[in-house]
Image (tube, rainbow, N blue to C red):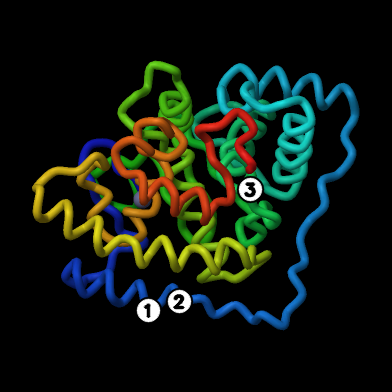
């Protein structure tokens, strides 16, 4: 979850002291995947030239990540977006139904899973797109996105802000929420599990201790302080920085950058993205 002004998160935060929480989550996220189970993964479907052209235009107008890709990877990206979008129900709240918005939101999911074999996040059937920041239940605070068992929620206004070229604050709400959704899909729901991701996520969670110690010692961090609310937020904020400004994260936190490359099996600092 990402609040607009302050740094609250109610879905994943648990009432434990930070150290205890890190420890608990580290244990929780040790790999438990059944290694004997076959690693079923989806296959990219064929798409028509019309879809290819239209999606290229829509995605290319927002995602510099996509524009960097070589032609064959662009095709794979669009095939995945098409497949992802077709498998979800999009709900538009406060704005007209818009297929292009569904394409863009799907593209943000495919961006972070582009290096993985299981990219469908098949636990999630519903995606809610809201026009602007919103309130939840009876809370006064405004939110720009969150992930709950019933779906992925995003403010479209803030979605576009995250992908605007001027953004150098490492904030991208779509990447942030898709990062939460990916963990939820693989560890809590265990639907369409990506075994590479599960195994390597442990390396990510075990690298947090040293980074946290460094932040406490030096009293500053390249990542915004929200990252240190708990392990889930550390993950989501790290993935945001990884995609918004790969060069910046690589320069300031090279070990973290390296681990994220391994977990997501891609390097967004390169044009090819996939090694
Ligand atoms: Zn969050």
Distance CA(mark 2)–CA(mark 1): 6 Å
As drawn, is 223 to the left or to the right of 198?
Answer: left
Nearer-N-terminus badge (3/2): 2
In this rendered view, identify the residue nearer to me: 229 or 15.
Answer: 229
For disc 2, the neighbor class at 10 Å (few under 14, some 14 to 19, many from 20) is some
- What residue is shown with label 1? 27
In the displayed structure, 272 sits above or below 62; it is: below
In the displayed structure, 244 sits above or below 121; it is: above
Task: Mark 3 and ligand 1: say if the CB distance to the nearest ligand atom is below 8 Å.
Answer: no
Cβ atoms at labels 3 and 1 below 8 Å apart = no
Residue 248 position by quadrant: top left
Task: Mark 1 and ligand 1: say if the CB distance to the nearest ligand atom is below 8 Å.
Answer: no
- What residue is shown with label 2? 30
In this rendered view, identify the residue nearer to me: 151 or 74.
Answer: 74
Q: Which residue is pictured at 81% across the width and 25% down the height?
A: 52
Cβ atoms at labels 2 and 1 below 8 Å apart = yes
Where residue 114 sits in the image (x, y, percent)?
64, 44
């Amino acid at each position: 979850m990402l609040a607009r002004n302050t740094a609250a998160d109610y879905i994943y935060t648990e009432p434990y002291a930070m150290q205890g929480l890190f420890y608990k989550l580290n244990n929780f996220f040790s790999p438990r995947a059944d290694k004997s189970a076959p690693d079923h993964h989806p296959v990219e479907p064929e798409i028509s030239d019309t879809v290819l052209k239209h999606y290229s235009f829509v995605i290319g107008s927002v995602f510099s990540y996509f524009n960097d890709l070589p032609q064959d990877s662009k095709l794979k990206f669009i095939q995945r977006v098409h497949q992802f979008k077709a498998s979800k129900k999009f709900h538009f709240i406060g704005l007209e139904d818009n297929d292009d918005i569904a394409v863009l939101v799907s593209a943000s999911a495919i961006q972070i899973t582009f290096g993985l074999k299981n990219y469908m996040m098949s636990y999630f059937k519903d995606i809610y797109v809201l026009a602007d920041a919103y309130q939840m239940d009876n809370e006064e605070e405004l939110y720009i996105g969150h992930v709950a068992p019933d779906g992925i929620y995003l403010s479209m206004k803030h979605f576009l802000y995250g992908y605007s070229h001027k953004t150098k604050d490492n904030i991208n709400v779509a990447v942030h929420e898709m990062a939460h959704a990916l963990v939820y899909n693989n560890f809590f729901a265990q639907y369409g599990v990506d075994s590479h991701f599960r195994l390597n996520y442990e390396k990510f969670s075990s690298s947090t201790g040293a980074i946290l110690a460094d932040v406490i010692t030096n009293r500053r961090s390249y990542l915004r302080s929200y990252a240190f609310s708990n392990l889930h937020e550390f993950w989501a904020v790290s993935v945001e920085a990884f995609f918004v400004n790969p060069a910046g994260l690589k320069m300031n936190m090279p070990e973290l950058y390296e681990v994220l490359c391994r977990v997501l099996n891609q390097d967004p600092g390169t044009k090819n993205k996939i090694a």
